[in-house]
């Protein structure tokens, strides 16, 4: 397979072109979820019926390599509009079937952004119109009921993050999907951030040596975000990404220490700032932090190893591109490419050099989902990963409340 090489301190790092984007070889290894290994007679029978009767799936019409997916979206706020609709409408072979929203203003937004895409008042109406997967992008308080409704309707489900209020609720949702034989995934798009893919490459190539400390932070100054219930507080909202990334890189956690800050003394749920220290079973220590009241953000990543340190500032550019109305379809090969002044640094002693950033590829989540729905690939994000992350965040809230280290 062809590749492009990055040289860092004498180490060769190969990056592979996969799914139309530069992605790490390691990112292609996905853990097959439990429900993918159990009997799914009902789902398999439905798929076979669709292939016999629906033109969009018939191989004699589209050829053996064609993969189609009809996707619907529930919710058209900031997340649904910019982080999901933008990508669903860009996936080759996918059909953006419709959006569930009762807001007249948002129905008009759908019509303006995606002419011809239908809107519905209920999830049941959307499923009845014919979809293979529904994406739930509503406030956290309504998410559980909608996920369970979709599961009962027998349609594959993608949940935005945070997946659940706590680990018990996350486990309930995963077990419900497994009982029904329904594919359930969690939208962890930041696994395909440019900077995170670069960190993975450097670690996989041993360019940094043995990792001792991983520092990861997303900090902004956005006072209007204080007290917003839609994401369940900064730890649940931003922390869902940071904890997930730490677990992907370094595996299970043994000890958790946390500090949370709230706008009111009697508040215990909607934190605006968090710091979490994780001690992984392999000995790596992760320091994770997030805030919506920080004027001077920390580096996005700082990864310290025996052979050197990598650091990078700022957020992956895909978010700003989506807010600007750009899409992977409109930008093509330009999507996810970081300008060289935004690249990170490798440092060892007096030596300092730029590290070219990997190309970000949020679209890869939906491309992998498309293959999973068609039973040609694995779930892009195993929902059991969301349970593990929720357990860590539960421990973080307990640590902050009691002022102690929590042992898992």
Image (cartoon, rainbow, N blue to C red):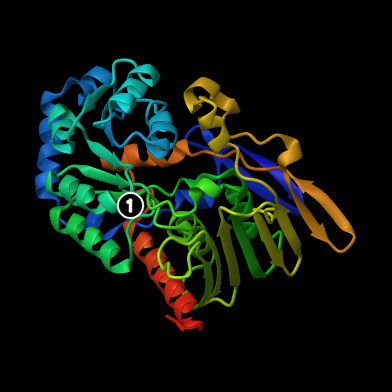
Q: Which residue is more in the foreground, 215 or 120?
A: 120
Secondary structure under tag 1 reads: helix
Q: Quadrant of residue 301?
A: bottom right
In the depicted structure, whether residue 396 falls above or below residue 383? below
272 shown above or below 80: below
Residue occupying the point 57% across, 41% down: 16
- Relative to the observer, which residue lies in front, 256 or 190? 256
- Asked whether 90 or 64 is in front, the reply is 90
Q: Quadrant of residue 138?
A: top left
**Numbered-mark total:** 1
Left or right: 201 in relation to 138: right
x%, y% of residue 151?
17, 49
The answer to whether residue 127 is visible is yes
**In the current view of this chain or complex, which residue is farthest to the right?**
350
Using a 10 Å C-alpha cutoff, classify the residue at mark 1 as few (fewer than 14 neighbours), some (14 to 19) or many (20 or more): many
Q: Is residue 51 visible?
A: no
Q: Is residue 40 left or right of residue 92?
A: left
* Residue 147 place in picture, x, y as percent: 23, 49
Give the left or right position of residue 55, taking residue 164 as reference: left
> Which residue appears at 82% of the width and 49% of the height?
353
Q: Residue furthest front?
A: 265
The residue positioned 63% from the left and 65% from the top of the image is: 214
Give the residue at mark 1: 140
Quadrant of the drawing holding the C terminus: bottom left
Residue 251 rendering spot, x and y as whole percentages? 49, 68
Q: Check the image and report above or below for 123 versus 159.
A: above
Q: Quarter-wise, where is residue 200 in the image?
A: bottom right
Which residue is at 48% across, 39% downward? Answer: 362
Quarter holding the N terminus is top right
């Amino acid at each position: 397979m062809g590749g492009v090489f990055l040289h860092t301190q004498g180490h060769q790092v190969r990056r592979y072109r996969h799914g139309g984007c530069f992605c790490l070889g390691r990112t292609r290894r996905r853990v097959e979820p439990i429900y993918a290994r159990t009997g799914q007679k009902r789902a398999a029978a439905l798929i076979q019926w669709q292939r016999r009767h629906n033109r969009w799936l018939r191989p004699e019409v589209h050829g053996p390599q064609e993969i189609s997916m009809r996707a619907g979206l529930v919710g058209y706020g900031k997340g649904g509009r910019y982080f999901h609709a933008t990508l669903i409408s860009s996936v080759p072979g996918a059909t953006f079937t419709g959006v569930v929203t009762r807001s007249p203003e948002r129905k008009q937004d759908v019509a303006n952004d995606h002419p011809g895409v239908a809107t519905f008042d209920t999830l049941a109406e959307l499923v009845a119109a014919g979809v293979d997967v529904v994406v739930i992008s509503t406030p956290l308080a309504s998410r559980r009921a909608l996920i369970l409704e979709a599961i009962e309707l027998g349609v594959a489900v993608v949940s935005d993050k945070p997946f659940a209020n706590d680990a018990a609720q996350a486990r309930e949702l995963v077990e419900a999907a497994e009982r029904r034989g329904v594919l359930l995934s969690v939208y962890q798009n930041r696994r395909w951030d440019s900077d995170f893919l670069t960190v993975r490459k450097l670690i996989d190539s041993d360019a940094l040596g043995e990792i001792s400390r991983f520092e990861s932070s997303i900090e902004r100054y956005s006072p209007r975000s204080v007290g917003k219930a839609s994401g369940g507080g900064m730890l649940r909202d931003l922390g869902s990404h940071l904890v997930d990334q730490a677990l992907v890189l370094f595996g299970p956690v043994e000890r958790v220490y946390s500090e949370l800050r709230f706008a009111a003394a009697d508040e215990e749920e909607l934190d605006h700032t968090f710091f979490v220290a994780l001690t992984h079973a392999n000995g790596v220590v992760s320091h994770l932090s997030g805030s919506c009241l920080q004027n001077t953000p920390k580096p996005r990543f700082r990864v310290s190893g025996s052979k050197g340190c990598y650091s990078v500032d700022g957020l992956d550019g895909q978010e700003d591109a989506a807010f600007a109305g750009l899409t992977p379809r409109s930008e093509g090969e330009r999507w996810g490419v970081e300008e060289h002044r935004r690249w990170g640094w490798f440092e060892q002693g007096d030596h300092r050099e730029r590290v070219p950033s990997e190309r970000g590829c949020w679209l890869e989540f939906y491309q992998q989902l498309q293959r999973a729905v068609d039973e040609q690939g694995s779930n892009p994000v195993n929902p059991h990963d969301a349970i593990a992350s929720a357990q860590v965040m539960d421990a973080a809230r307990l640590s902050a409340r009691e002022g102690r280290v929590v042992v898992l």
